[in-house]
Image (spheres, rainbow, N blue to C red):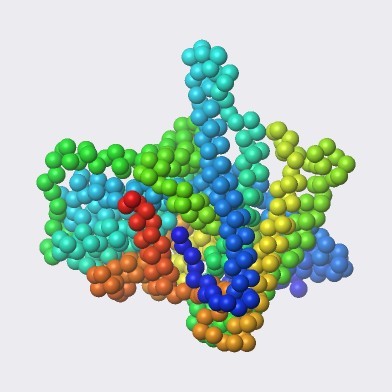
Amino acid sequence: MTPIEVSIVLAGVLILLVMIGVRVAFATGFIGFLGLFLIFYLDRGQDAGRAFAVSLQIAGQIPHSKMSTYVLGLIPTFILIGYLAYYAGLTQALFEAAKRWIAWLPGGLGLSTVFATAGFAAVSGASVATSAVFARIAIPEMLKLNYDKRFAAGVVAAGGTLASLIPPSAILVIYAIITESSVGQLLLAGFIPGAVSALIYGALVILLARMRSDLGPPVGGFSLAERLQVLPGALPILFVVFIIIFCIYGGWGTPTEAGALGAFVVLVMALWRGMGWDNLKGALIESAKLSAMILTMIWGVLIYVRYLGFADLPGAFSDWITSLEQPPILTLLCILGAYVVLGMFMDAIGMLILTLPITFPAVIALNGGPAVSAADSALGMSGDQVAVWFGIIVVKMAELCLITPPIGLNCYVVAGVARERHGITVQDVFRGASPFFIADVVTVAVLIAFPGIVLWLPSLVIG
Amino acid sequence: MAEATVPEDDSIVSRADRALYRVEQGFALIAGLTILAVMLVSVANILGRKLGEWANDAGLDGIAAWLGPVPGFVDWMEQAVPLIAFLAIAYCQRLGGHIRMDLLVGQLRGRALYVAEWLGTLFILVLVLVLIWGSWTHFGRSFDWNAPMYSRDSSIDIGLPLWPVKLLVPVMLAFMALRLGLQLWAYTAAIRDNPEHGVGVPRIESAAEQAEHEAETLHEIGAGEAR
């Protein structure tokens, strides 16, 4: 068998291992090591002992050498911000602030929920957890004012999906590391699409409220003093988002330093709100667990990536993709379609880690290669630009799958919180979230049609 | 905080599980404190550098001399990330925290489930054993009894020896192997006794159960928030 054939078989075995429930990080590492061994044994004609020793040496250094990377320090920091944000009392403060400032508009409390969840999701970076928190805070208030219960649940489930694009975003950092793209540019690029998604959700709520009078009343009558009073509690959120944008944009510091500054502010806020050692310890251990999970996946997949480099499967796949007799944009849409299907069954991070080593080089090749200029490219973007743009699109797609059946986790979590108290079923939540799903599809289409929305902010930094 | 449901009883395997878990919790806490340290050192670095620049521009040389970036900042950060990656790896495995797709396995019940889990765990154990060996030789190439600081290689900026962190990798993977061995043992016991939920290993939760679990955790946090 040729190395390519072996690698296709191994890719099949990898999928099988993942399907039967082997943990993704180790399934990729296992196949990577096995592949390295087979390459040296079958293709390079070494005896089994020698092939084993060589692959042992290559695979054995990856966990340490790939983890000794400065930029990876961002991931634990971003995760810590998320856990501390709960203790800093940011959730209630945000909702209250959003309520007093914008709930006078049609669909008022729904609108407040959209922006409060967007803000908190951005900082916590955890879509599912955000939906769980706001299911407790926002749904009871909406139901008290006779808001439609499906709508109330749907808004909360959908709002949580705004976590991944607005900085700080751990998933964009993971994308940057796997694809060796610029972390700073990806973090900047996420901001406008994330904000646009939130605005589109907001517009959708207003539209729904106009069309259906039974949706729920606006809430108004807050004085200016009452409005100003709630602002200080919500400010740390804006601070964290903007410190990261400005640090990278203004070149003041690295993304890692910016993330640390954000985490520091939230920590001070949480301590000021009376967080004790037990809570801090809990937040630290939880952050350590989640960081270990993500970092393990990264080194696991990098063993696989090292093998793929030897076998040149990504190269072969790219050759095949570029040889297809159809417009590149159509091929790209097919790849994105595959992500939608995969996302219905898999967690976002796992899905990206498993697929990016093969799809990313293919997309780059589809556009005309890593060094192509915007003028000569198939998609109208330079190699670096398409790397950033594709990252934003796939992350948005992965988030979108959090509100689709059968395992849209955000919907389950909202139903989990609200079922007993308010009689809201999973079906209610899926139905309530469906208009937002359609809005997201439109958003993705817009981002594909107008890549400038994604690329404008990072382009200012490159000059 | 969030604890995956790992059923317990008085059996030896369950007691061994809890004993190992206490050690793993200790390592996880050190990993957490490392994250805190990374954050504080990064803040000190950016503030020190920026304030130093401003003091310099303002002609406050006395103050500027005191301020500045943290010496060897990038070197320290590069040493810290592997600590975070490996110290909590077994803790994460104990709680079933490493991502997987349990759509198919989640459908299984009883012995079929335990056999599937046993096989999945064995795959991980094989890889981890290979990597203990490989990362140990990686450490071996760095460590030298006769070299200054026992080290053949060092970090670029301030010359930190690299072997301590390289050694950490096989050591923590050995704890991971211990955890996996224990899980194999627990699944073997479960295959033999066929209980509803195997002792000493994480229970598989459906999406709805996970969601409820998440909600409970956050409820506890919410209570903390209200204080």
State the image coordinates of residue A170 (x, y, percent, origin top left).
49, 51
State the image coordinates of residue A449 (x, y, percent, origin top left).
39, 53
User: In this figure, what is the number of numbered marks?
Assistant: 0
Which residue appears at 59% of the width and 51% of the height? Answer: B31
Q: Nearer the viewer, residue A92 or A148?
A: A92
Which residue appears at 14% of the width and 54% of the height? Answer: A218
Lateral position of residue B86 relative to residue A50, left or right: left
Q: Nearer the viewer, residue A168 or A371?
A: A168
Using the rendered image of the protein, determine whether residue B91 is visible from the camera's viewpoint: yes
Q: Nearer the viewer, residue A446 or A33?
A: A33
Using the rendered image of the protein, determine whether residue A369 is visible from the camera's viewpoint: no
State the image coordinates of residue A51 (x, y, percent, origin top left).
83, 65
In the image, residue A149 above or below residue A245: below
Q: In the picture, residue B126 is in which quadrant?
A: bottom right
In the image, residue A311 above or below residue A267: below
State the image coordinates of residue B149 (x, y, percent, origin top left).
80, 39
In the image, residue B135 above or below residue B63: below
In the image, residue B210 above or below residue B161: below
